[in-house]
Structures are given as structure tokens and as C-alpha cells.
Amino acid sequence: MTDLSRREFTKAAAIAGLGGLAAGPVAWARRLQGADDGLFDWRPVAGRSGALAGFNGGGNALLLVSGGQALLVDTKNSGLGPTLRREAEAAAGGSTLTTVVNTHHHGDHVGGNPSFTFDLEVIGHAQCAVRAEENAEQTLSGATRILDFISRAEEPPSQRVIDEVQAYVDGAGEIGAEAFAPTRRIEDDVTELTVGEIELTLHHPGNGHTDNDLFVHVPALNLIHTGDLVFHNLHCFIDVGAGATTRGWERSVQAMIDLCDADTIVVPGHGELTDVDGLRAQIEYFQQMREFVDEQRDEGSSKADIEAMTPDMFEGRGFERMGPANLGKMYDELEAEG
């Protein structure tokens, strides 16, 4: 098998994880902030606030640093936890990493949990814990694919990163399902936390992308991490098996919009940084798709017919292969509504 090009390697990262939907390799761009042994693309997202977002290797992470403490949102794909923890602690600049938040149970958001759950408080919805344990074997297996592809990439990461992933794979047999589950399970609609001098809230708005979604609101920074309730300029994964509903998803995103103004920084679960317009665009995605599918149903098109169509709203949107499946899921949802 030939080496992946950098472009192919980067594109593969974009479709990795997603609750096990993507069976292909996991990969990422090697965009580092000057560290020879770094992997993740850390970018400041709120000026001097100590907020950094990590954009590759799985769902977008967020690091908040304040008053000697640090909090990490989401832990990337399986196998990357050791590297993520090393880099997050280094980025914290002497502050102590005390807390991790899981926005939901999918493997590209909890895959690194075993590097944190043994000694830190990892917070997630109670149903996140249930589903993370149920999917643990599948999540864990992804580490082998990661090792394979970083090892033969055209532009591989540092040997230190490869060694970290190798060590993880070598010890995978000792990792139990419970290591992927949050250690603190919450069920309230709103949970308040403090990191140093920063107050934040975790919101569970109901079923949307899954039945255990959380989004993170940091009022002092005018910042929201959406989890996978936003796939910015990308087709999304509608995890029907985990309780997803597009109408509930719209309500969840609206709950975020209600907390925003024109200057709010929005870190999506996948895709580039955005703002309140990116939230509105996520709702519009479902509304346009629903209208299109409903019109086709009225004209007598079958589910298979509709899945083979390419509506105008699909143009220029990434994660292309999810589009047809989403049309089918919208069809099923509308059929169930009668």
C-alpha cells in the first residue's frame, strides 16, 4: 500500500470517529505550534484568556486555563490520550489540569479518556457513561488504525508521538471499558463549574446529536464549545441509534443562540471556529433538508430515490459521504411524524 499524501491524510482525519460511522483510517494534519514533538493544532481562541482549541485528531478540543487550574473539553480518538495530556499540560503553562468534560460518548470525543479517568475528574452526562462503556471495544480498536497510519504517513508526526501511540496499543489489553466513561455523571439541564477564576456552565438541552449531548458556555469569555451539536460547513452525523432527532437538535442549537451575541466565539465539534451565524447555519441545514425531503415525499419519491439525490444545499459542504445517509434519516423522521 502506498503512503498517504498529506492532503489525503488530513482529509481522513475529518471523517474519523463519529460514533463508529467511519471505518477508514484516522489521521490529521501535522500543524504544530513550534514543538518538534507536538501533534495537535492548538490555537488561541479568546485573546489572552488562556483558551486554546485543538483542531485535529478527532473532535475539536478546548483548553481553559485560569488561576492555576486548567480544564479540557473532549479527549480525541483512542490512542491519542497520552499525547493529548502531555500537550494540554504543557499548554497550561504550569497550571494544573484538574478537570475534563466529555460533550458526548462518541469515540472521537472520549477516545483519550483512559489517559485522564484514572486520576482526574471527568464529567459527562450519565447516559454518556453508559454508551461510552457499551462502545468501548470499538473505540479502543481505533488505536491500532491510528498507529498504522501515522507510522506510514508521508509526513509522520514525531517519533515521540509514534512511541506514545505504540505504547498505548501495546497496553490496550489492560484498558477496561469503564476507563472510557466519565467519572462524574450529571443529569441536570445546567451544571455550574469553576476553573480558577472562570465560571462556566454545562448544558444538556435534550436529545439532539445524541441523547447525552452537553455544550459548554463560558460567559466571561463569551465562548461556547458546542460538542457535535455543530458541524460547521460539514454534513453532520445523525446518530439515530443514540437518540438523535433533528427537531431536538434544532432546539439544542437554539438554546446556544439564546446565550450568544454578535461577538460570541463558537468552537464547533467539527470544522473551523465560527460565531452565532454558524449556529444559525446548523439549524438552516436541517430546515432546508426537511423541506427538500418533504417535497420529494409529496411527489412520490421513495427513500432510496431521495438518498440518491444531491440537493443544492449539499454544494461545497464537507463530510460528503454523510449527505445521502442524512437524507434517508430525515425521510424516516418525517415518516414517523406522519
Image (cartoon, rainbow, N blue to C red):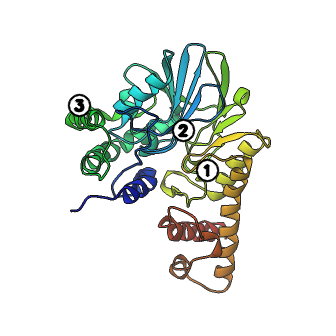
Question: What's the residue type where badge 2 is placed?
Answer: Thr
Residue 251 percent across, percent down from the top left: 71, 50
Question: What's the residue type where badge 3 is placed?
Answer: Glu
Q: Residue at label 1?
A: 230
Q: Earlier in the sequence, mark 1 or mark 2?
A: 2
Separation (CA) of disc 1 from disc 2: 12 Å
- Secondary element at tag 2: loop
Task: Say whether residue 281 is left or right of residue 112.
Answer: right
Q: Outermost residue toward the bottom?
A: 299
Q: Residue at label 3?
A: 174
Q: Earlier in the sequence, mark 1 or mark 3?
A: 3
Q: Please report the residue visible at 37 percent of the width from the left and 55 percent of the height from the top.
A: 6
Q: Please say if 223 is above or below 1.
A: above
Mark 2 Cα-neighbour bin, 10 Å: few <14, some 14–19, many ≥20: many
Q: Please say if 126 is above or below 333.
A: above
Residue 278 percent across, percent down from the top left: 68, 52
Q: Which mark is residue 103?
A: 2
Question: What's the residue type where badge 1 is placed?
Answer: Val
Separation (CA) of disc 1 from disc 3: 34 Å
Please indicate, yes or no, whether residue 130 appears anywhere in the rendered image: yes
Separation (CA) of disc 3 from disc 2: 25 Å
- Secondary element at tag 1: loop
Mark 3 Cα-neighbour bin, 10 Å: few <14, some 14–19, many ≥20: few
Q: Quadrant of the C terminus?
A: bottom right
Q: Please report the residue visible at 64 percent of the width from the left and 80 percent of the height from the top.
A: 297
